[in-house]
Amino acid sequence: MYQPLKARFTSKKKNNHGKKSEQELKEEEMDLFTKYYSEWKGGRKNTNEFYKTIPRFYYRLPAEDEVLLQKLREESRAVFLQRKSRELLDNEELQNLWFLLDKHQIPPVIGEEAMINYENFLKVGEKAGPKCKQFFTAKVFAKLLHTDSYGRISIMQFFNYVMRKVWLHQTRIGLSLYDVAGQGYLRESDLENYILELIPTLPQLDGLEKSFYSFYVCTAVRKFFFFLDPLRTGKIKIQDILACSFLDDLLELRDEELSKESQETNWFSAPSALRVYGQYLNLDKDHNGMLSKEELSRYGTATMTNVFLDRVFQECLTYDGEMDYKTYLDFVLALENRKEPAALQYIFKLLDIENKGYLNVFSLNYFFRAIQELMKIHGQDPVSFQDVKDEIFDMVKPKDPLKISLQDLINSNQGDTVTTILIDLNGFWTYENREALVANDNENSADLDDT
């Protein structure tokens, strides 16, 4: 081992004391350090050759002024996506796969379901071509194997599985083409461009006026970002878009024979988008394109409390004290989906007036007092807060008996009921009279049966 550098230098310094200047001694010290460090590093290098095998895992993104590098990256991504697209089964290949599966089915048929066993499953895999190889595995067969006594799987179930996989990959590639950053996520403008260019391919949107396209796109995009971007980062992972059901709902509009009921329940349908935008226009009494607190108070049954509306305008993005269409969409999505965690998070933030991360007796009383005042105005006898408070805590059953957290609200599956009780007189009245309403419904049903 080397003698410590400091000791060596001290020894030399003693021997040469008085013969060298301070600057010369510093230079000599640096020379010694460089010499010994180089020798040490060289010795270490021979014993750590495996470091060379570590693959590169960080690639710096081109800066804004590196135009050539940015263009090269875009082109290489486009080529990669094209190659991935060519690896997918086309319509002709899917038809050929169905023909092979049907040809190799094994009787007996279960109901109307044609079945295939593992041996023939592998035979089809060999004949179907290299693109299908990934689907003909023991894992896939076992996944689709249920209760057939002959150890077979349904041909239709397997074919639907393949179709779903192909669709997911096609959609992933389609979304990735709009991923300008190339980082696996879409910004709001990226998703807007995707949906805008998707509109002409959806027969159910044929009747939309082009002047309404921008409002439709805003309405559609808002649902994705409200539920998939809870931290409001302004971007959503493509894999999250694929994992949720929203894209299925949107692409359901390709069905030319979609029922009226399905259209009404689908946020992305033309009737639904026109309904939401129509409500916004009806609320906007002064026609300035924005909603004041007074205008928003007429939303729904016009029975939301002023205290809650005050909180909406305190916490949500407004312009000179008025709400734009995008902020209104968040409000609507929260109130129409109160069972969903993202909606409860939105409302919980408004109810948490002290910003403590939980609701206590003071918070509940603060909002319920406004309900009691509305009851007096409408000639109803106010309900005791103590009774309502006890009911709320009984429904939620929080971990802390004195505090209700957002997670407590979500876990209880009663979040929609609790929030309705605190912010909307009509909602509270419906809750209070739920037993009488159920009995009345039963009586009406019985009368209809008699007739």
Image (cartoon, rainbow, N blue to C red):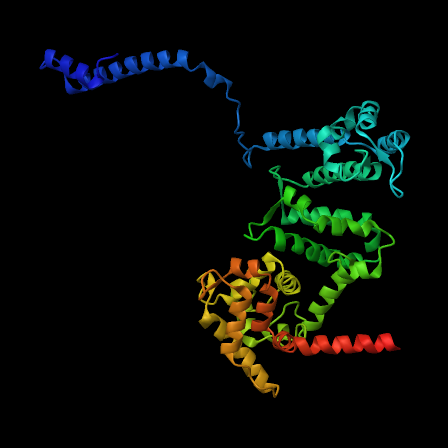
Residue 11 is left or right of residue 135, and the answer is left
Between 432 and 447, the residue placed more toward the observer is 447
Which residue is pictured at 55% across the width and 84% down the height?
Answer: 382
What x and y, as percent, mark residue 319? 56, 65
Q: The C terminus is located in which quarter?
A: bottom right
Which residue is pictured at 60% across the width and 38% down the height?
Answer: 183
Q: The N terminus is located in which quarter?
A: top left
Residue 50 is left or right of residue 443, and the answer is left
Which residue is pictured at 73% across the width and 33% down the height?
Answer: 142
Q: Above or below — where is 47 with respect to 443? A: above
What x and y, as percent, mark residue 201? 81, 47
- Residue 8, visible in the rendered structure: yes
Give the quarter of the image for residue 65. top right
Between 169 and 9, the residue placed more toward the observer is 169
Give the quarter of the image for residue 318. bottom right
Between 73 and 57, the residue placed more toward the observer is 57
